Amino acid sequence: MATEKRDTTVEQLIGVAKSAAVDRLVTEDDSRDAEVVGNVLTHVTDDGIITREAIDESVTDTAMILSTAETRVELAGIALEEARERAQSAPDVDSVRARLSAFESVVSGAEAQVESLGETNQRLSAWQRESRSLYELVTGLRDVASGAQQVTRVADDTQLEIEEFETWLTNHASRIRELTGDVDVLEQSLNGISETASQVDDGHASADAWFDASLRLRTVPLSIADARAELDDVRTMAPESASGDEMAEIADRLDSLDGRARAMESELDGVADDAWHEQYGERLESFESTLDSFETPVSWAAVQSELERARQV
């Protein structure tokens, strides 16, 4: 049972040896781990002593990390604005609107997060004017730094994706390559499902493996519909000089994969024990019903979330 917390303030621990500070913090809250507390206090320790200068340095380091995040988010926002302007001269198709909408959601989320981190950091930075727990101050600063680093990664990745989108927007070959890659991934997914069906038929796969393959197979029609919608947009965006051969080849591959997926559904149903249908039937029907609510362009992050939920129910 944890003892009642009596938070030790920053001022009470300045000049105290780190080992003694660890003992004191663990004693006042025995749910704390001494090793974890020691690692936390390392950020505000000089030569084994808690010092005001080390605390200020930790505050400064956190502010610099946060400043980097703010800059990267700003750059991502600038890249998004440039992409919006470039998209104005492109055909008004769903594929363009969906990509811009996804970028806007990520950038606005990053802006809100970095603003919240800034407010938290501002409160923590005023530690000399407030009576604040040293442990909470340092863990708060580490949380801000960690959050800012995560925002920086998201902003950098998003800026790169926006730059790739601009290439996609203005280059027919890039659009063909991306769509061809999507079809390749879809084909590989079907290959994996087919392999599971063979393993089940040979008695080398479990009911859980069959269920997972059945779930994944139910996403295939949605993938095909999404790719076909994308192909329609690629046709609309294609320059007059573009050959239709590559687009026709993609269409043929999608037709072939569609037929293969339909046949595989019967194959998977046929190799399963009756008890498996009884055990998993309602969950498969529920997942299929959920997928019916999705429209193109598909939010694949949302589909993946539903897939994970269906696996865990």
Image: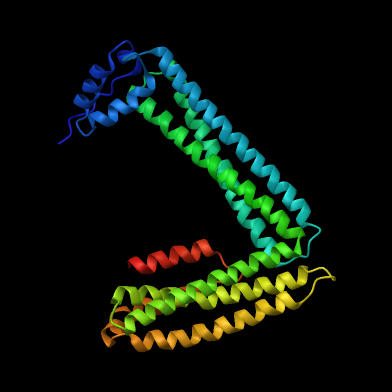
Q: Is residue 99 above or below residue 266?
A: above
Q: Is residue 170 above or below residue 57?
A: below
- Check the image and tell me how it is coloured: rainbow
Q: Quadrant of residue 228?
A: bottom right
Residue 267, image x and y in percent?
Answer: 41, 87
Is 53 left or right of 34, judged from the image as shown?
A: right
Q: Is residue 293 visible?
A: no
Which of the image's four quarters has the N terminus? top left
Front residue of 87/3: it is 87
Which residue is rendered at x = 37% and y = 30% of the image? 139
**46 with respect to 191 (left or right):** left
Question: Does residue 275 appear left or right of residue 60 in this picture?
Answer: left
Q: How many marks?
A: 0
Quadrant of the rendered image containing residue 74 = top right
Relative to 135, say whether 98 is above or below. below
Q: Is residue 62 visible?
A: yes
Residue 185 placement (x, y as % from top left): 54, 69
The residue at 67%/56% (across/down) is 100
Query: Measuring 40% from the left and 13% from the top, which residue is drawn there?
Result: 52
Q: Position of residue 172 (x, y in %)?
A: 75, 65
- List the single residue furthest toward the top: 15
